[in-house]
Amino acid sequence: MDAVRTGRGIPIGRVAGLCLGLGLAMLLAGTGCSRQEEAAQGASQSSGAHPSADQAHWAPYAEPTEHAFTVELPEGWPAQGGLRRLTTGEVRPWLRASAPDGSAEIFIGDPDIPDFTPPTTALADAGLTEGRIYMPGEGRALTVSPYHEGQAFAAEWGRGKLGGHCDQVTPTGGQSLPDASAALAGVDGPPAARTLVKAGETRFSCQYRGQPAQAYVFAATGLDSRGPFEVWDVRVVGGLIAQTDRHGIAVEALSHAAKSFAPDTEWLKRQPGWSGDRIRDTPKVFPVLAAAAEAAPR
């Protein structure tokens, strides 16, 4: 399978090795690229008993730049969230949060994932081969890349993202999720409005901050063939990394965050046209991520 690439033409697998946020794999940029520093930080934290998932207390977190959304996270979990505004005016949310002892983290969205268009003969004749940027007009920028269904994207993107934070990243399983695909297919309207939506998941094992860990990535991608050229995008991506004895609380934190994600109604009123649709749809989209994470084999 060809690697999904960034707008810079860098495969995700290579991006994971770059510090300071080059490309798609660095969702957690800003937390540092040194696994040795992370391991030391994890070892320096309290080794007291961890609260179980059913003991979690939830606290609200508000998106800080525009107050575009709120979400509930385990009390005491530091978080970062924000918006990505595309040149077309579309707005996409992202969130990441971590346990205060450094044993787990969750993520929803990635501000660095571009939109894509599959390779064609016409694009190749124009010198727009895989990894190059196609500018069809109206400020839109599309990275040339073959369409990846959700499970394939979760595997490729997840491997790159985890590689910046874990050692010995190893896929342990993955599958397409037809029920999740069906649930997401109708979000944009009648099924004909989007020709294809495919969701899937991949599970990984790794060494996280010096301890055995499990990771989970869910992704759903959509391919739209209505216009003069095909466009595909990532409808939702999210997941977690957790040391083995913290996997349960990480799943609960991800699921609760996804289900509690609430767009701010006043913010939505201020958005022109369809620019807020991606956030407006989150009450329908993110619960699908939550259900998949809860049902994933452990």
Image: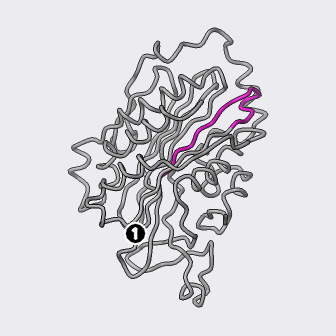
Q: How many marks?
A: 1
Q: Residue at x 61, y 86 (%)?
A: 127
Residue 208: in magenta span? yes
Residue 212: in magenta span? yes
Give the secondary structure at mark 1: strand
Q: Can you say whether 36 is above or below 155 in the image?
A: above
Q: Can you say whether 283 is above or below 247 in the image?
A: below
Q: Residue at x 40, y 69 (%)?
A: 224
Query: Where residue 71 appears, x then y in whole percent?
Result: 38, 33
Q: Residues within 10 Å of mark 1 (few under 14, many from 20)?
A: some
Query: Where residue 269 appears, x then y in whole percent?
Result: 20, 50
Query: Where residue 181 appears, x then y in whole percent?
Result: 42, 52
Q: Which residue is mark 1?
A: 224
Q: Residue at x 73, y 19 (%)?
A: 44
Prevailing secondary structure class for the magenta stretch in the rendered image: strand
Residue nearer the viewer, 142 or 100: 142
Residue nearer the viewer, 223 or 10: 223
Kindly give the residue lying farthest to the bottom in the view shown. Answer: 125
Seen in the image, is 270 located left or right of residue 298?
left
Query: Mark 1 belongs to which amino acid?
Result: Asp
Residue range (magenta): 205-220
Residue nearer the viewer, 123 or 112: 123
Q: Residue at x 54, y 67 (%)?
A: 147
Q: Can you say whether 195 is above or below 83 in the image?
A: below
Seen in the image, is 236 located left or right of residue 248?
left
Residue 59, picture quadrant:
top left
Kindly give the residue lying farthest to the top in the view shown. Answer: 48
Residue nearer the viewer, 106 or 111: 106
Kindly give the residue lying farthest to the front in the view shown. Answer: 178
